[in-house]
Image (cartoon, rainbow, N blue to C red):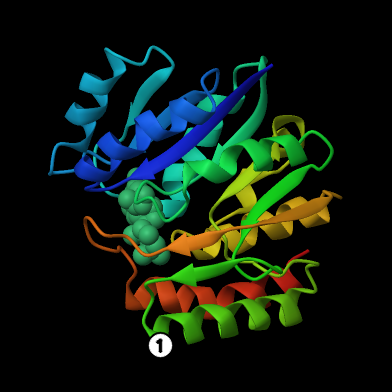
Amino acid sequence: MKTVIIIPTYNEKENIATLVPLIFAVVCDAHVVVADDNSPDGTGEAVRELAARYRNLSLLSRAEKDGFGKAYLNAFKHVLAAPDVGKVVMMDADLSHHPKYLPEMLKQSETHDTVVGSRYTAGGGTSGWELWRRTVSFCGNLYCRTVTGMPLHDCTAGFMAIKAPLLRRIDFSKMDTAGYAFLMELKHALYKAGASFYEVPIIFANRTEGVSKMSADIFKEGIIAPWKMRFKK
Ligand SMILES: Nc1nc2c(ncn2[C@@H]2O[C@H](COP(=O)(O)OP(=O)(O)O)[C@@H](O)[C@H]2O)c(=O)[nH]1
Ligand SMILES: [Mg+2]
């Protein structure tokens, strides 16, 4: 069965060119799908060029920027339609999620439905983040865990390896978060579907190329999302 790594991108030209070779150096038989929103910096073109060298690399393009969560929903629909996909990995393009963690995460995913690359389990952490961002992230996680009751230290992590049959059981039509709250909503849906979780400690390094797409709207959505999840039928 195939492992497919999905990477959402918006203006990540330099990062994707660095990331792709690092991924194939550690998991040479994986398939990588870059879910790009017609990035004006030419990320899509860079992926097409790389695909000439890496036959397991492909580009999934949308016409315009439509949010992180929707980029994943679109990619899931595409990737999960293939019956020979056994595992799906989610990771950012900006090297905050280093590929060196992939072998351990994929090993653990043999015995756990959902493996999370976790900043807040023992041995994990962040590097290069300002105090305000560390505080917001840490408190946001505590808040999400307390409100939703999910058995996870890192509820907002975007680095995950998930067994495809479990993902196929999720009703994505009920998921409506556009930004990073999607990561909490997805974990909650997996939790409700009976998934077993395992957290692999990672050091999340701040990006050195490109800019973050974090915004006030995404932040607000993240505050409301845990309550919506808690009371959702
Ligand atoms: N396709 C797509 N990717 C996005 C969008 N917003 C963010 N991303 C990608 O999602 C990943 C995480 O975003 P990033 O800006 O690094 O978030 P941060 O680490 O929380 O600041 C990166 O690979 C981004 O390029 C979007 O609207 N569409
Ligand atoms: Mg980032």
Judge whether 182 appears above or below 220 on screen. Answer: above
Q: Is mark 1 within 8 Å of ligand 1?
A: no
Counting labels gives 1
**Residue 67, visible in the rendered structure:** no
Q: Nearer the viewer, residue 10 or 29?
A: 29
Judge whether 36 appears above or below 94 on screen. Answer: above
Image quarter hosting the N terminus: top right
Left or right, residue 29 beside residue 36: right
Q: Name the residue rendered at 81%, 56% in the picture.
A: 192
Q: Name the residue rendered at 45%, 26% in the picture.
A: 24
Left or right, residue 55 beside residue 90: left
Question: Where residue 182 sits: x, y (%)?
Answer: 54, 58
Judge whether 101 appears above or below 27 on screen. Answer: below
Judge whether 199 appears above or below 224 on screen. Answer: above
Question: Where residue 49 sits: x, y (%)?
Answer: 21, 20
Q: Nearer the viewer, residue 72 or 175?
A: 72
Image quarter hosting the C terminus: bottom right
Q: Which residue is mark 1?
A: 132
**Residue 49, visible in the rendered structure:** yes
Left or right, residue 191 beside residue 17: right
How would you rate the neighbour count of disc 1 (Cα within 10 Å): few for under 14, some for 14-19, many for 20 or more? few
Residue at the left extreme, as displayed: 41
Q: Amino acid at mark 1?
A: Trp
Q: Nearer the viewer, residue 6 or 227?
A: 6
Ligand 1 placement by image quarter: bottom left
Question: Where residue 119 sits: x, y (%)?
Answer: 59, 66
Question: Where residue 66 sits: x, y (%)?
Answer: 33, 50
Q: Secondary structure at mark 1?
A: helix
Left or right, residue 150 beside residue 45: right
* Quadrant housing residue 226: bottom right
